Image: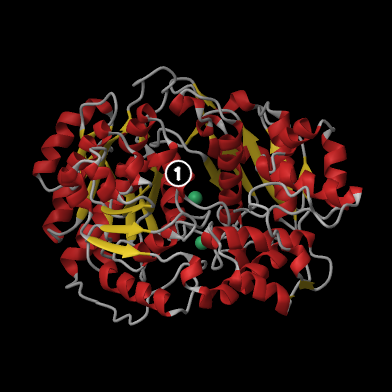
């Protein structure tokens, strides 16, 4: 949106005009208001608005009449009508007279936002011969996608090749190699970048939940569903859906998935309305799907539908050249976040890092550096600060620094992180009151570092 | 510049404490808890059984001249503006006041399962979002940015929980936040 799109709101009710004005202003549009049809026409003759929102029922010139007068000036003009429930039949006839659509008062904000966006997009496509194919030789990388090794450069090339297409991509690699970062890189380098990339961890959800998670549900679809919720496929409209751990979904869900991917249509749970969504599919797996197909655990037709273009991310131990770069990146990230002065990694410590096997890959390295920054005392990380034989997620009890306060500090940090820094809950777990916990946080200078 | 948090029919004191603690970590600014004598029943729409947020803010303005900074109203009430079925929050663009409603941020209304952690995350996002409008920010195209538009609960959940590097400098007193 370089030049802001111009919207004219026409309604005789002041509070309606004002609240719509305010709402669209925040959306980033250039907004103007008119209190009746005459005023609207005057404004429209001076300035061609991209879109008009017009109340059906106004004293003097009706919304319908304004619609036809506007259309007479510019048949490409986009008019969305606002109607009361009672005037829906009239609104439908207005569609025949060239209205883009109508909304019934009161309208769901996401429905209105979506409708306006859709209308303006169609208009933009019609008006411009939109072929501003930017020539990007390099891909834009998400912050954490790091590596200059030969293997990673190969991956950047693959991302570059596939990003601008709408091809389904299968990303393979051990866990912790950064499959979601590659997916994100593909998305932000595609034409879908202004729409979201929606991640779904198929392994983390029970089958019953997966269905409403993926397809959404209507109000009242089950006990407690007081409001409707859109599913991941609907959210991915215009963008990308990223299905992680695809190998873990049941055969029943595989059938549904295949159908949605092929038709791009589905129903919300408890609903009859057919929802259409335009999404790109990126999937990731750390297990060989071929084996699952042979074992009858993964449908062959779905496998072929998904295995169009694949990107294999090597484990960290096969691209040791990148370890130094990654370690320094994480050091910088965590020492800034924790307000520490640690600026470098000692030669011995770096040697250890480079030679370690990293079965948990980049994520394990990241955790190791985070921990080193937490325990690090001087301005450089030394071998003792690293968790040698400790698996990265465990609380290290065999630590060199055995002073009681050092242990307390680490333990409190662990509990805080486990509880997402919810102070009340952490205090409960620690069996101390909130004030004591606040004091300890200040005393040990603890900071939240997200993962 | 200080930030003033004013609960108006907001009953969860624990949550309030957590929100203030989190805001204090996110901002250099002082975060203050204040009380405003807003008479909420003046703003209820009888046919909609909801509260008109613009009108709540208009009343709140009468009581805030002594507070030098941004004033954010927190409520459990279901709020709306005409034409829209509901809103999560409203702010004066480039102004001093905003309001955030927890009503439709409760997970139990969607899945039937109450979850305070999710509610906290959503409330923080919407508070930061409305504050951003107070500092003149409009909606941001970056999905990782808390200023991304969120007309529905799904967008609230998808968008990030901090300002992007483009938006952050506009928000006075806000620290850099690491994901
Ligand atoms: Zn907003
Ligand atoms: Zn932003």
**Nearest to the observer: residue A226 or residue A361:** A361
Query: Looking at the figure, which quarter contains the C terminus of chain B?
Result: bottom right
Whether residue A278 appears in this view of the structure is yes
Q: Is residue B135 left or right of residue B107?
A: right
Query: Which residue is drawn at the image coordinates 74% and 39% (left, top)?
Result: A423
Q: Position of residue B134 (x, y in %)?
A: 60, 54
Q: Is A264 situated above or below A149?
A: above
**Nearest to the observer: residue A80 or residue B105:** B105
Q: Position of residue A343 (x, y in %)?
A: 74, 75
Q: How is the image coloured?
A: secondary structure
Residue corresponding to mark 1: A19
Query: Which residue is drawn at the image coordinates 69% and 43% (left, top)?
Result: A421
Q: Is residue A188 left or right of residue A389?
A: left
Q: Quadrant of residue A417?
A: top right
Q: Position of residue A214 (x, y in %)?
A: 33, 38
Query: Which residue is drawn at the image coordinates 46% and 37% (left, top)?
Result: B81
Q: Position of residue A51 (x, y in %)?
A: 27, 55
Q: Is B59 situated above or below A301?
A: above
Query: Which residue is drawn at the image coordinates 65% and 39% (left, top)?
Result: B73
**Nearest to the observer: residue A317 or residue A51:** A317
Crowding at dot 1, Cα within 10 Å, few <14 / some 14-19 / many 20+, comes out as: some
| Chain ID of residue with mark 1 | A
- Number of numbered discs visible in the structure rendering: 1
Q: Is residue A250 left or right of residue B80?
A: left
């Amino acid at each position: 949106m370089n030049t802001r799109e111009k919207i004219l709101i026409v309604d005789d009710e002041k509070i309606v005009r004002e609240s719509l004005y305010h709402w669209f202003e925040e959306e980033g549009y250039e907004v103007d208001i008119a209190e009746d049809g005459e005023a609207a026409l005057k404004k429209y003759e001076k300035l061609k608005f991209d879109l008009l929102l017009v109340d059906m029922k106004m004293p003097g010139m009706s919304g319908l009449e304004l619609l036809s007068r506007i259309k007479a000036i510019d048949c490409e003009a986009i008019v969305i009508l606002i109607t009361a429930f009672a005037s829906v039949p009239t609104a439908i006839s207005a569609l025949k007279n060239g209205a883009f659509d109508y909304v019934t008062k009161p309208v769901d904000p996401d429905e209105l936002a979506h409708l306006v966006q859709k209308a303006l997009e169609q208009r933009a496509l019609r008006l411009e011969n939109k072929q501003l194919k930017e020539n990007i030789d390099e891909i834009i990388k998400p912050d954490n996608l790091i590596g200059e090794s030969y293997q990673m450069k190969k991956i950047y090339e693959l991302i570059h090749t596939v990003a601008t297409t709408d091809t389904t991509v299968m990303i393979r690699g051990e866990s912790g190699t950064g499959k979601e970062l590659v997916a994100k890189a593909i998305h932000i380098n595609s034409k879908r970048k202004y729409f979201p990339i929606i991640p779904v961890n198929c392994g983390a959800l029970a089958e019953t939940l997966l269905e409403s998670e993926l397809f959404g549900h209507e109000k009242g679809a089950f006990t407690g569903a007081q409001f409707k919720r859109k599913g991941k496929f609907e959210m991915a409209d215009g963008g990308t859906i990223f299905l992680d751990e695809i190998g873990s979904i049941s055969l029943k869900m595989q059938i549904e998935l295949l159908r949605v991917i092929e038709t791009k249509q589905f129903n919300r749970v408890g609903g009859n309305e057919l929802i259409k969504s335009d999404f790109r599919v990126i999937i990731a797996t750390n297990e060989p799907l071929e084996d699952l197909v042979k074992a009858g655990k993964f449908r062959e037709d779905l496998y072929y539908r998904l295995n169009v273009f694949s990107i294999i991310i090597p484990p960290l131990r096969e691209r040791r050249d990148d370890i130094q770069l990654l370690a320094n990146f994480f050091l910088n990230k965590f020492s800034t976040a924790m307000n520490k002065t640690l600026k470098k990694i000692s030669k011995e410590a770096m040697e250890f890092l480079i030679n370690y096997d990293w079965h948990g890959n980049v994520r394990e390295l990241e955790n190791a550096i985070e921990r080193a920054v937490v325990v690090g005392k001087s301005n450089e990380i030394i071998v003792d600060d690293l968790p040698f034989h400790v698996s990265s997620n465990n609380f290290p009890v065999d630590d060199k620094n055995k002073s009681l306060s050092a242990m307390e500090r680490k333990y409190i940090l662990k509990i805080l992180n486990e509880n997402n820094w919810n102070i009340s809950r952490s205090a409960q777990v620690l069996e101390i009151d909130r004030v004591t916990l606040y004091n300890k946080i200040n005393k040990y200078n603890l900071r939240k570092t997200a993962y | 510049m200080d930030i003033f948090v004013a609960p108006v029919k907001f009953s969860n004191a624990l949550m309030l404490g957590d929100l203030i603690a989190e805001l204090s970590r996110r901002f250099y600014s002082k975060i203050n808890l204040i009380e405003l004598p807003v008479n909420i029943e003046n703003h209820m729409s009888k046919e909609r059984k909801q509260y008109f947020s613009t009108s709540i803010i208009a009343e709140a303005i009468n009581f805030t001249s002594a507070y030098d900074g941004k004033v954010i109203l927190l409520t459990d009430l279901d709020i709306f503006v005409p034409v829209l079925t509901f809103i999560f929050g409203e702010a004066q663009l480039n102004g001093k006041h905003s309001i955030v409603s927890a009503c439709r941020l409760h997970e139990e209304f969607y899945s039937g399962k109450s979850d305070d952690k999710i509610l906290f995350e959503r409330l923080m996002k919407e508070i930061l979002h409305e504050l951003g409008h107070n500092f003149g920010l409009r909606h941001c195209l970056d999905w990782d940015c808390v200023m991304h538009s969120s007309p529905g609960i799904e967008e609230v959940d998808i968008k990030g929980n901090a300002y992007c590097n483009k938006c952050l400098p506009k928000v006075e007193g806000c620290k850099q936040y690491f994901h």
